[in-house]
Image (tube, helix red, strand yellow):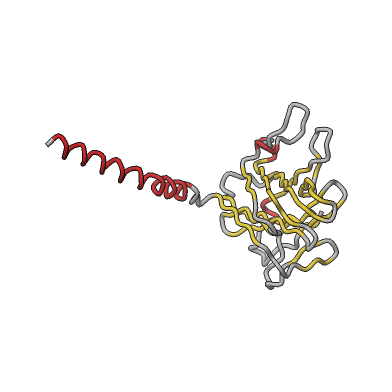
Amino acid sequence: MKKITLQLFALVTLLMQSCSPEQIEDDSLNLSLDPNFRVTEAIINDVVQHNNRISLPDGGNEPCLSTNLIAGQHHIAGTVTVDIDGSDIIITYTTNEDWTIGATHLSIGNCAEQTIPTTGSGNPKVGHFEHSSTHSDGTNQVVYILDTSVLDDNYCFAAHAEVSGPTGGETAWAEGEEFEGNNWAMYVNALLSDCDTDDGGTPPIIF
């Protein structure tokens, strides 16, 4: 009887060990299904550049805000755009044909609350940004989708990227206002009301 009990115990232990990794993997997938935050990446082959602005040949509407993605302080590597879809704010990084995106970091919040993490000297703490992602080789478009319910009309965001292009690997920022620190990092100061489409659409803001 004792021998049978030990065999049953060994069988149960073996079954538990073989199921555990699958269960852990399923749990981690479930944790990523946050309806208030999504990030996607893509390789867009038909990117068209017009006067330093990026457009996609899908016939879509113009974004309500568009600013340059500046790499290495001196190169226009693409654009960062903002759109509103219902309660979602959609922030899209798109590089031109010479550049790809290896990683992105995004911090967004109300301007009055100064929510973008910075050091005591006023430089952004990219490693502390709320949202970040690494991307597959060849990625040239990254889309962040977030809920606008926690934002006031006047919101600020810092969109950082690690990009590769003709000059090699570079740090890139969405063009906007400079931080108070001693580097060239930038953030964008914007209004949700500029994205109000009730009147049939608002022309994009170009920095």
Residue situated in front as seen by the camera: 156 or 33: 33
Nearer to the camera, 44 or 201 = 44
Q: Viewed as shown, does residue 110 lie left or right of 11?
A: right
- Which residue extends farthest top? 120
Q: Return the residue found at the far front.
A: 3
Q: Residue at x 74, y 56 (%)?
A: 100
Quarter of the figure that contains the C terminus: bottom right
Instruction: Tell how many labels.
Output: 0
Q: Position of residue 36 (x, y in %)?
A: 53, 50
Front-lying residue, 47 or 119: 47
Position above or below: 121 against 202:
above
65 with respect to 133 (left or right): right
User: Residue 178's quadrant in the figure?
Assistant: top right
Query: Which residue corresponds to the image point at 75% horizontal and 58% vertical from the top-left?
Result: 95
Residue displayed at 67% across by 64% down: 199
Up/down of 137 relative to 56, above or below: above
How far across and how far down the image is residue 74, in percent? Answer: 88, 49
Question: At which x and y percent is residue 137?
Answer: 68, 56
Q: Determine which quarter of the picture holds residue 139.
A: bottom right
For the point 57% across and 58% down, the residue is 86
**Taking 189 as reference, is 52 left or right?**
right
Q: Position of residue 103 (x, y in %)?
A: 68, 48
Residue farthest toward the left in the current orientation of the protein: 1
The N terminus - image quarter: top left
Up/down of 129 relative to 63, above or below: above
